Structure formats: structure tokens, C-alpha cells
Image (cartoon, rainbow, N blue to C red):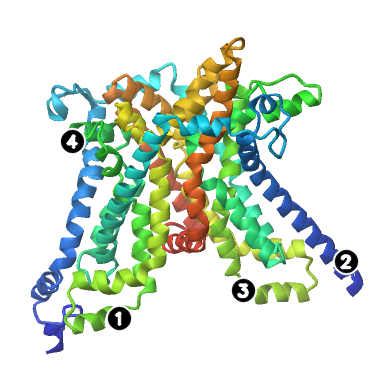
Amino acid sequence: MREQTPGQRNADEKIFDAVVNIWAALIVVVVLYPLIFIVSASFSDPALVLNGEVILLPKHITLDAYKNVFQNGQIWHSYGNTILYTVVGTLINLLMTTLAAYPLSRPDLPGRKGLMFFITLTMFFSGGIIPSYLLVKQLGMVDTMWALVIPGAIGTYNLIVMRTYFQTSIPWEIQEAAHIDGCSNWKLLSHVILPLSKPIMAVMVLFYAVGHWNSFFNALIYIRSKDLYPLQLVMREMLLISQADSFDSSTGMANKVLLAESIKYVVIIISSLPVLVMYPFVQKHFVKGVMIGSLKG
Amino acid sequence: MKSTANPVGVAPRSKSRRSSLYKSIVSRYDLYLMLLVPIVWYLVFHYGPMYGLQIAFKNFVPTKGILGSKWVGLDNFERFVQSYYFWRLLWNTVSINLFSLLFAFPVPIVLALLVNEIRNKAFSKVVQNITYIPHFISVVVMVGMLMLFLSSRGGPVNTIIQAFGGSPVRFMESAGWFKPIFISSNIWQNMGWQSIIYIAALSGVNPQLYEAAKMDGASRLRRIWHVSVPGILPVIVILLILDIGQLMNVGFEKILLMQNNLNLEASDVISTFVYTKGILQGEYSYTAAIGLFNSFVNLTLLVLVNRFARKKAETSLW
């Protein structure tokens, strides 16, 4: 081993810290830059964006694209749909997941191991997309909201996370004491367990709600009428499909094409806003949520 | 006295175990009542499709129903394995995952090690919270962003290329660029989120180990290599097993959105093929067979890798 004087060692440490901080800062920039660019582009003159003159901050600030989006009935209608699907879907998720997680968290439930196996097996083997599609079709759910909220009513991973939380974070003695006082299991769940489970419920709301908000594929295969389209499906048409045709028209349509381009940035922002606004409030909890899940993965 | 009044209490060892089991089930009937709807749901929405998988061995005709359709043995599987697309689909599916394991899997580990070395706790929190953000962006938005950024007309990336005298590249319409774009944007979106688990594992490493290493004169880099990395190795192995067990699954939704006729050569994967042939074109039996083939390979890999890890690394899922 190389001999080092304390001074040398201090200098080495400082250099190491500097390198670490520079790399970390670099990563932050790489993650943030695209997000900042989207925001800036949405406020800028679309012609400048297309010419590559908007680099970090907005140029020639204009709200035209926002005005246009706010007047677009289809976007707001689908926004409403998405809110409805997210609220109803998340409520069903919470109800179903809790109803399954609580009994399975009870160490005194006969048959618990078998039931857990019955449930975890589905994480490793599934019928796949085609049989699921045929099933939903046969149940008459196609082109209704139910196709979006019922087939995914329980996320098995979330169920395991919640069960682990009940097992590890709520003292068993409390439950026993409540029982001796003559408390039924339903009452125990609603009056003792749930009030003690706010952190895990916050995590579940975040996971499930973000899932509903962001999902497009189920709507793509199950929803036929445009009236029922969720936001992501409308966005798919605006962001991804219109791409090809907007390239062709370069003459008289130029302005419209330009506006269509900046509308894309606006749509991205208004669709991501609710999730990003929610984020700081639940941020503290979800690290815990991920950890609980991995504890007993 | 207590045990009869208290349904939670462990039943006393009675002479007949069956009657005590019966008692403990009956006294907890309300727990089973809670489980009733979820269990029925699992039966319908998870075991139902497994039952429906038999159409993979049949020539399923929707009007005849699952039971009324004729058995055809392994015909659907043979057709897939012999089809013109088989090797292309298999290669694309597997290679996207292999490249991801190679390039994307280590990134969150390195990020976690880096975050762990940041001394300023506030800065460390900032780095963590910012890198988590992209995880919450929807696939549609993610692909939309890719198209905007990589557009050959006014996309910032091409602007930079042109500024350096290059000619614009049509990234999204090229088969060669498909996999690099898919994987690197995945890294951007998920590295922070996936680092959470490693960061947590690192915080559980015994600080005395670092002190001891320091006493021995180990540099920071050596401490990372000899203390931090071994400390999170079990977590790394578990996540690696899980990832290999998903070798035949790809970020299906994202690929579907990124796919176009010009990059199909590289973007045609098993799951998108199942979607197009099955749901869009109605070849249910054929695509159910492909799906089954896929799950079967995944499950086999998972079991094999898990067994291997249990022997070699003494870490396993079960």
C-alpha cells in the first residue's frame, strides 16, 4: 500500500468529492433539460422553435398554443373522461386491494399460505393478452368504462406491498386487544387498521392513480367510440399520428402546421401537470412504498 | 374461557385438530367474506384467461366458443416457428432485452453509488427527487417527446447536428437507430426510480465497515468497490433474476408507439406481432399460441436462473 501524508489524503478526498458532485450535477441537467425545453417551447413562437432558436428559455413569448388547446373541446372532454376513469378506477383498486390484503396479512388465517400462492402465481404466469381480450369482450365490457377499471382492479405487486405493510407496521397486539374488546374484523379494519395505514394508502393512490392517468393501451383495444376516449388516446393521435401528414403541407398551411407543432408541447404539459403537482406531496411516502415491496419480494 | 371469547387467540390444542381448525375458520368467517370478491376477481380475470389459453391448441372460432372449437394440437405453434417472421421477432425481442441488461441495468446501480457518495445531504436529496420525475411521464408523452426532440425538422438534436455541419438524421424512421433510442430513453426515464432500491440498500450497509476500510488506508473508490458493492450485491442479483425472467417481455406499449413501417425491421417484437395479428386481425388461436410460447420461455428462464443464483450466489427469489 502506498504511503500517504494526511495532506495528500485530504486533497484526494476533495478531488473525489468534486468529481462526484460534477457527475451528479451533470445527471440532473440531463434529466431536467428535456423537461425545461418542453415548457419553454410551449410558450415560444413556433417558428423559432422549428428553426432551433429556442435553446433553454422561451423566445417571443406567446400564448397562442395554450388558447388553441383551451378551445379544443375534444381535449377537455377526454380530460374529463380520464379524471373519471382515474377516480373510479383508483377507488375500486383501493377497495379491492385492501379487502384482499388485510385478511392475508392475518397470521391467524387458516389457508393463508395457499391463498397467497394462488395469488402470487399470477405474477409469474398469465393467460396473456389474447385470452384476456376475449374474456373482456365476452363479458360485454368492450366500449364501456368497466373495461378500463375492472380487469386491472388489483395489482398483485401492490397487494403484496400492502399486506407486508399491515404485517410489519401495525402491531399485532393492537389487533388482539381490539378483538378482546369484542371488535369485529370489519370494524377492526375500518377503525383500527385503516387509520394507521395512511402512508401506505398514499403510496397506493399514487401508484394506481398514475397508472390510470397514464394508461392508453387498454383504451386502445377496448374503447371504440371517440366520446369515451381518455386523454392519452387523444394525445396519441395528436402527438404521434398527425406527425406524418403535418410534414407535407409547407405552403399555405404553414401557420397552421406551426401552431400544430407548438400545440404538441402544450398538450404534453397539461397532461403531465396533475401528476407532477401531486408528486411533491406523496414523494416522501413512495420511497417507503418501494422499500416495503422489495422487503418481501 | 378466554379462547372461546377471543376469535384471534390461538385455539388451544384440542384432541381433535380438525374441529379446532373448523372452529378457527368459522370464527374468522368475516375475513373470508372480505376475501370473497377479490378471490372471485382473481378466478375470473387471471385464471379465466389461463383457461382460455386452450385456444392455443384449437382452431378458435368465436361463434363456436372455446369449447365448441376443434382441437388442432400443436399446429399453431408449428406455424409460428416455421413462419418467415419467427427469427426476426425472436431476435428483436431478445436483443432489445440483452442490450438493456448490458447498458441499462448497471445505470441505476452506478447512480445509487454516486448518490451515496454525495456528502451534502440536501444536494443528494435534490438529485434523487429530480431523477425520479421522468418515471411518472406517460408512454404516449415519452414517445411524443422523442418525436419532437429527434424530428428531422427543427428537432433540437438535429439542430445541433446541423450546427456542427452534419446532415439531419431521420432517427425515428430508421431501423438502425430504433434500439439505441428505445434503450437510452428508457434509461433516462427509469434510472432514478430504479435507483431507489439500491440507495436504500446502501443506507443499510454497516458504517463500521467503511470506517475499518478507511483505517486500512483504502481510497474512496476502493471503499465503494470493496464495501458498497458487496453490500448491495444480493439486491443486484435478485433484480437481475427478475429481469432475466422477463427476457421475452419488452416495453410493449412504448415499442408499439415508436413502431412504423420504416423501422419495422428492428421494432417488430413478439408482443407487437401478437397485438397486430391477434387483436387487429382476429387470428386469436395463432396469437394465443405465440403468447403461450412467450410466457413458457420466460417462466423457464426464471426458474433456471433462480436455481443457478441459489447455487452460485446464495441469493434467490424462493
Residue located beneath label 3 in the image: B206
> Is B175 rendered above or below residue A216?
above
**Which tag is nearer the camera, tag 1 or tag 3?**
1
Mark closest to the chain's N terminus, 1 or 4? 4
Q: Is residue B202 left or right of residue A230?
A: right
Q: CA distance from mark 1 to mark 4?
A: 43 Å
Q: Are marks 1 and 4 on the same chain?
A: yes
Q: Residue at x 71, y 33 (%)?
A: A54
Q: Are marks 3 and 4 on the same chain?
A: no
> Is B175 rendered above or below residue A88?
above
CB contact under 8 Å: marks 1 and 4: no
Q: Amino acid at mark 2?
A: Ala
Residue located beneath label 2 in the image: A11
Decide which of B107, B245 is in the foreground and name it.
Answer: B107
**Which tag is nearer the camera, tag 2 or tag 4?**
4
Q: Chain of mark 4?
A: A
Please tell me whether mark 1 sits on a helix, a strand or a loop.
Answer: helix
Q: Quadrant of the C terminus of chain B?
A: bottom left
Is disc 3 surrounded by few (<14), some (14 to 19) or many (20+) residues within 10 Å? few
Q: Amino acid at mark 3?
A: Asn
Q: Is residue B18 left or right of residue B315?
A: left
- Provide residue B255's location: percent of width, then percent of height: 49, 30
Q: Are marks 1 and 2 on the same chain?
A: yes
